[in-house]
Amino acid sequence: MLPRSLAGKQLDLAVINSNFALAANLKPTRDAIFVEDKNSPFANIIAVRPDELNQPKMKALAKAMTSPEMKQFIEKKYDGAIVPAF
């Protein structure tokens, strides 16, 4: 509702998560007055149950999600709207 209200000039300011902004065709790097950086305490994390922490598939997932290739993909696809925090 916030992106629609902002676009309809019903609001002067709104705090909108990047995923909702992108879905509403807003471009955070152009339309935002503030975008969190990679040091944000609200970065997404990978969480697993303690009994699965050392499973090879979980280690492979963590490695893939924090790889240089993943960082490059995020930077290219989201053009600064989503910032890799790793």
Image: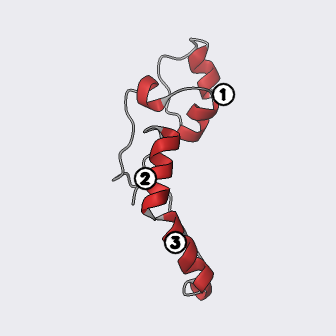
- The local secondary structure at tag 3 comes to helix
Mark 3 to mark 1 CA distance (whole Å): 34 Å
Give the answer, above or below, for where 61 lies relative to 84.
below
As drawn, 50 above or below 48: below
Q: Residues within 10 Å of mark 3 (few under 14, many from 20)?
A: some
Q: Position of residue 64 (x, y in %)?
A: 53, 68
Marks 3 and 2, how far apart at CA: 14 Å
Residue occupying image coordinates x 45% and y 64%:
67
The residue positioned 66% from the left and 28% from the top of the image is 1
Above or below — where is 22 with respect to 56?
Answer: above
Q: Residues within 10 Å of mark 1 (few under 14, many from 20)?
A: few
Residue that label 3 marks: 62
When the figure is inspected, residue 24 is found, relative to residue 11, above or below; the finding is below
Q: Give the residue drawn at x 35%, y 45%.
A: 37
Quarter of the image containing the C terminus? Answer: bottom left
Residue in view at x 39 percent, y 37 percent: 35
From the viewer's side, name the closer residue of 49 and 14: 49
Asked whether residue 57 is in view, the answer is yes
Left or right of 60? Residue 82 is left
Q: CA distance from mark 2 to mark 1?
A: 27 Å
Q: Nearer the viewer, residue 81 or 67?
A: 67
Closer to the eye: label 2 or 1:
2
Q: Position of residue 15 (x, y in %)?
A: 49, 33
Q: What residue does disc 1 label?
A: 1
Q: Is residue 17 visible?
A: no
Residue corresponding to mark 2: 84
Check disc 2: other Cα within 10 Å, few if <14, some if 14-19, many if 20+: some
First reached walking from the N terminus: tag 3 or tag 1: 1
Q: Position of residue 76 (x, y in %)?
A: 47, 43
Going by the numbered disc 3, the residue's amino acid type is Ala
Give SS at disc 1.
loop
Depth check: 9 or 28 in front?
28
